[in-house]
Amino acid sequence: MSSKHFNWTDQDQICVDTIRILSAEMVQAANSGHPGMPMGFAKPAHLLWTRFLKFNPDNPFWPARDRFILSCGHGSALNYSLLHLAGYNLSIDDLKNFRQLGSLTPGHPEFGVTPGVETTTGPLGAGISNAVGMAMGQRYVRETLGNSDSFNALDHYIYVVASDGDLQEGVSAEASSLAGRQKLGRMIVLYDDNSISIEGGTDLAWSEDVNKRYEAYGWHTQAVDGEDPEALFYAIQNAQGETVRPSIIKVKTHIGFGSPNKQDSESSHGSPLGVEELELTRKALGWDHEPFTVPDEVYGVYAEAADCGRSKHEEWLEGWEEWSQGLPGRKELWDHLTGGGNRDYVTEEMPLEFDLDKPLATRQASGTALNFIADRDPGIIGGCADLAGSVKTTVKGGSFLPENPGGRNIHFGIREHAMGSIANGMALYGSLRPYTGTFLIFSDYMRPSLRLAGLMNLPVIFVFSHDSIGVGEDGPTHQPVEHYAALRAIPNLWVIRPGDAAETMIAWKMAYDRTDGPTAILTGRQKLPIIDRKGQFASALEAQHGAYVLADAPNNDPELILLATGSELSLSMQAYEKLSAEGVKVRVVSFPCWEVFELQSDDYKQSVLPPSVKARISVEVGIAQGWDKWVGDGGECFSMESFGASAPAPQLFEKFGFTLDNLLERAKVVLERNR
């Protein structure tokens, strides 16, 4: 906790006005953007960055730094102004190129693009929810590493700036509720209460008392005037002193502060002030510098703050060196949990042998694979949206709770969207490998989080079970039909639908070994045969290619190809046996992951799907969308083009035509058409 006393000088006011004018100039130069929020929140942001925030611009990802998350990402000009002033690798020219192609200053902050940006924000509610994951990650890593009486390796705070819009979004309510239960005392939210939305005053759609709501969540709450830096200074100190509850400080601000005609108006929210209004704002603030000018004294104030951070970093390094040697293996564990470390050994010996006489649901095999990896990697942590017993996501280590901070099973509650965002935040925190679990049908609820994981290249593992009409009696509300296609539409998301227990183990190996993006593993409820791979059929290791020839025609010369995923792989293998016995030269291609198959060489892809073989059938109990690319002009999709129904699974497969007789009939029609 800070022990500093408040002081405020004329230099501070010049710094604040610099941020306001810089932000407005950036938006004006781009002729698009959101000047109002940065202008209104400039004073609280300046106070936070110069009095409290622990950062080192020379090492933006120092693990013990404070995190600063601008959840209201439309106010990105504020973030970029602060990063530039604080000495990060962001020049005035970068500010002038705001929102331009290839610039370091995109319209909304993007992780991995701009130095110092901790997470991609813009979809409102995502940033504050990511921050909950960061705070949970901090607590788990601290507990796992252990501390000494004299040194705390991760003694830092997670600061969030959130807007009215952030707190209106449902995901923030989900995440904030869980944060209260988890007692994340290192999380401090500054709520920019400017009472303005795009359509007008927030009272058009909102009448609640936000602080009372957060008090009910179990948060520490305060309220201050954003133009009173002394009140805010002591409010942040109070929040730091609250070591159990997360804190929210309601900061009353004026959107577009300083603009004579647009302050406190929706007109300053999402468009440039305009040349004339910007000039009037300059005069109102007493600003007589050329555009994009930063007075030397402003750079001096921020250089002092940066130097303070550098000194704290040096002190931390000295303490860390001794602490890291305090217990055997601690340094290696630190590298593993915060810097990546070496994980290559973890999946080398994934078990692939199963009892051929005992059919096994892929969800059960998924649980086996998860526990195999978790036993070897303490960085695996995650949980389920109140469905762990069904999705099979429980690992050894107990529940992750304030009373058991080293637990590895997170109880997210029925909060799928927040679950995804929190997992993203945990991945952003360091080198944790978070996973989530729910039924596939509920992937709809967490789609924004899946998309952001793909956008940020985060190696989160999303487990979805109950992946077809095989769910049965729960009916069409719980039977995914369009969801395979919907997930495959997300760029950079690998979607793996394994066909038996062995492929499920490989699916986990693929997901775990991947470091440049997220993976969704789709598993089923119904028991499936174990494919005997010791004879003529290919090893499950071939699934790492995304698609492979599981069973082939004599001389590797097929006239018909069946392409299948998931539970339909066993149906295709039955068809293979029947057709082969009738003299049809048929190949079965197991196709668990389109995205990985796309990464293979053209030679490999053509070896699996020879262009000369036009007779092809995709077999998947979901909509056919996307399969046309793989079946080609001469092929056909054996698919599900309607919602399901409530009945036992065998009756549903019969009703909707997913039977061996139906598949054989379609195969012969397609074959004849291409002869």
Image (tube, grey):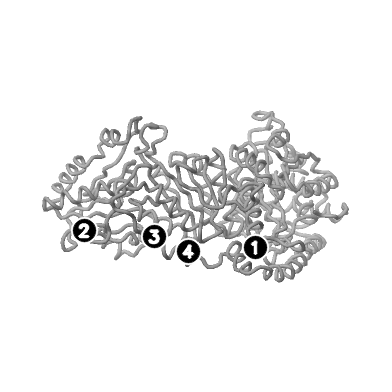
Q: Nearer the viewer, mark 4 or mark 1?
A: 4
Q: What residue type is labelled 2?
A: Asp
- Name the amino acid type tagged 4: Val
- Asked whether, in this view, residue 39 is left or right of residue 371, the answer is right
Question: Which sits earlier in the primary sequence, circle 3 or circle 4?
Answer: 4
Query: Mark 2, mark 1: which one is toward the viewer?
Result: 2
**Numbered disc in front, either 3 or 2:** 3
SS under mark 1: loop
Q: Nearer the viewer, residue 629 or 347?
A: 347
Q: Image check: 520 left or right of 60? A: left
Q: Mark 3 points at which residue?
A: 351
Q: Looking at the image, is mark 3 or mark 4 nearer the viewer?
A: 3
**Which residue does the numbered mark 4 point to in the structure image?**
346
Q: In this view, does 623 lie above or below 342?
A: above
- Tell me the element at label 4: loop
Report the amino acid beneath label 3: Pro
Residue type at mark 1 is: Phe
- Compare residues 475 and 86 and report the one nearer the observer: 475
1 or 3: tag closer to the N-terminus: 1
Q: Quadrant of residue 290?
A: bottom right
Residue designated by label 1 = 61
Whether residue 284 is visible, yes or no, is no
Instruction: Locate residue 651: give its quadrant.
Output: top left
Rendered view: 270 above or below 344: above
Residue 483 drawn at (x, y percent) = 40, 42
Mark 3 surroundings within 10 Å by alpha-carbon count, few (fewer than 14), some (14 through 19), many (20 or more): some
